[in-house]
Amino acid sequence: MKVIVGFGNPGSKYNFTRHNLGFLALDFYAKIHQLDWQNKPKFNAIVAKDDEHDLLLVKAQTYYNEVGLSVRTILDFYKLKAQDILVICDDFNLEFGKVRFRERGSAGGNNGLKSITTHLGTDDFPRLRIGTANDSLRSKIGDTDFVLSRFNDAEYEKLPEVLREIGDFIVKY
């Protein structure tokens, strides 16, 4: 089984924010594949099982910066290794909509990746970074407000194409 972890923050006030792109990608995938989300308090997460592709989709409810707590619990429960996960996260240093896969690597300033690295004791896990860059907006409002900002109209129009690309990657992964 592979565990697909989408980064985001719980609560409707974070819907369609840049930091919740991981949640959005998993929601899109679940809708396309007709999967149902279930609350799993023991994992501190909402999960959906894709039996056809042997995947467990995970939206940790710990908030973005503590996602490692949920991931560690899930890996321990299923007796999986760090390489059995795929993390999907936003990256404001990548061009909007650009999808970049790495088998392992540094957190690169991403607090969710730092949390997983801390809780697993390794940065040797696959990650799919999705570009959210909008340099003019980011320079006006700063990094914290930027990652919690919503997509503009042009970005919102491009989202289905980006989400389909992520979904295709997940199935092939």
Image: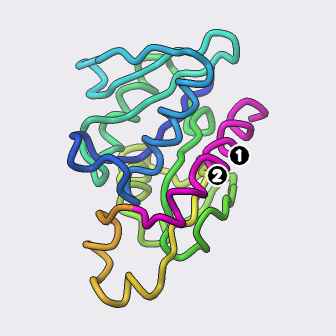
The image quadrant of residue 58 is top left
Tell me what residue is drawn at x 34 percent, y 44 percent: 67
In the image, residue 2 above or below residue 135: above
In the image, residue 97 above or below residue 119: below
Asked if residue 53 lies left or right of residue 112, the reply is right
Question: Which percent across, then down, holds residue 34?
Answer: 56, 15
Tell me what residue is drawn at x 47 percent, y 46 percent: 22
Magenta stretch encompasses residue 158 = yes
Q: What number is the disc on residue 61?
A: none
Dot 2 falls on a residue whose secondary structure is: helix
Dot 1 falls on a residue whose secondary structure is: helix
Judge the density around disc 1: few (<14), some (14-19), many (≥20) Cα neighbours within 10 Å: some
Comparing 36 with 55, the one in front is: 36
Q: What number is the disc on residue 165?
A: 1
Judging by the rendered image, the residue that carries numbered circle 2 is 162
Tell me which segment is drawn in magenta. Answer: 151-173
